[in-house]
Amino acid sequence: MATASSASPLIQLLSPPTSRRTPYRTVSEAVAESPDSELRALLEKSELVFDEISSRNLSRWVVTFSGGKDSTLTALLAADYLAQLAQPPQLDVVYSDTLLEIPAMRSAAQSFLDYLREFGAVHELPIRVHIVRPKVSDRFWVRMIGKGYPPPKPKFRWCTKRLKIAPATPFVDTGEPTAVLTGVRYGESAQRTARLVASCATGGECGQDYWAQRGPRDSRITYFAPVIDWRTCKVWDFLHFVAPLAGWPTQDVYALYGDTSLRFGCWTCTLVRRDKTVEALIERDPGSSLVKLHDFREFIWAESQKPENRLVKDGHLAGLTLEFRRDLLRRLRALERDTGRSLISAAEVRAIEQLWSNARL
Ligand code: SF4
């Protein structure tokens, strides 16, 4: 076990850890100095889960990382725990980049992953970071504009599996005995067991609930939720006050959330009718290009409700009409020019045009 460093918290905040054998402050040591007994108790509980995982001698640990606070906490605690083992298992951190992540959140996630890579290198830990993307035929615009899928909603959530789960699956389920660590937590309500705080509709991180509730069962994966008992405020206390004392750059994720409970996911997401996350980010930066992205998301939502933009099947509204989809593509290209952001790739446009021409045959 590493010993506490005598460097000041500020110096540790600015300096990455230098060597696995060089004393560095573990999160247990950082939290030991905190007057917050609940935080200490929660960390001990998480360590018990890690001890349990460790006792099973699984050769791989996987963290399904979204960039949000819960999976950041999970990845950080797992890496910190591994750094104290003589023979740490492989840790694979898998981040599904849907290509539509809210830009500020995507860059916060990438900064954290960069640090995690560096942490692994400096401490000679077998940590690998995988950034995965959906195949072209499964991408959001190809499905919506090319095939006519309506915007996702809770009863027709066609996107999560294609954009996040399928690309990550080969890195999560390799056939080896694996511990998959998800950032799911219980809420603060009295009916805690009925309320996992993990879906994007409830201010969580898109995809975490999927792995926990519907990940492969007939595999050699065992699922764990090391932070399941943490209350939201304690996650924040840890990321804001404690983790930086151990050198972890968790300020970005804290700065993004502020004191609000934001979801982590796509800027196009219509799982929630009103996107309070994007609204909160726009309020902080009214000149941001997120305003135009948000307007476009609102446009898609409103226009796709109109019967004239929908096909009808068995008396019910079905897919989007070809005419509306053509209009969407034109508007999306105009939005790219307007914002200076690349929002759709040439490969996606080709796939869309191919789908349109196949539909005409
Ligand atoms: S954030 Fe929303 S749009 Fe993106 S994959 Fe999740 S449910 Fe789908």
Image: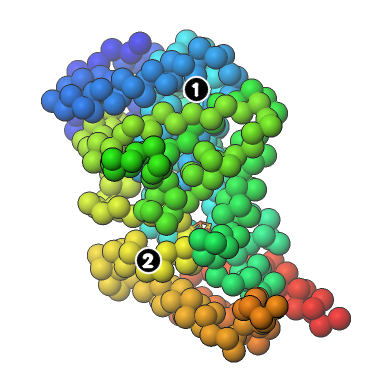
Tell me the residue at 42%/46% (across/down).
198
Query: Is any atom of residue 239 visible in this view?
Result: no
Q: Pick whichever, 187 or 274, lies toward us.
A: 187
Decide if ligand 1 comes within 8 Å of the CB at mark 1.
no
The image shows residue 317, relative to residue 22, as above or below, that is below
Write down the residue under mark 2. 275
Numbered label tally: 2
Tell me the residue at 63%/62% (across/down).
139
Q: Residues within 10 Å of mark 1 (few under 14, many from 20)?
A: many
Residue 148 got which mark?
A: none
Considering the image in quadrants, where does the N terminus appear?
Answer: top left
Left or right of 311 on screen, residue 154: left
Please name which of the two marks, 1 or 2, marks the residue nearer to the observer. 2
The image shows residue 140, relative to residue 205, as above or below, that is below
The image shows residue 110, relative to residue 279, as above or below, that is above
Q: Pick whichever, 16 or 67, lies toward us.
A: 67
Q: Quadrant of residue 137?
A: bottom right
Write down the residue under mark 1. 125
Give how far apart the Cα atoms at labels 1 and 2 are. Answer: 39 Å
Residue 53 x/y as whole percent: 49, 19
- Badges 1 and 2: C-beta atoms under 8 Å apart? no
Residue 333 x/y as whole percent: 56, 79
Q: Pick whichever, 270 or 104, lies toward us.
A: 270
Q: Quadrant of residue 194?
A: top left
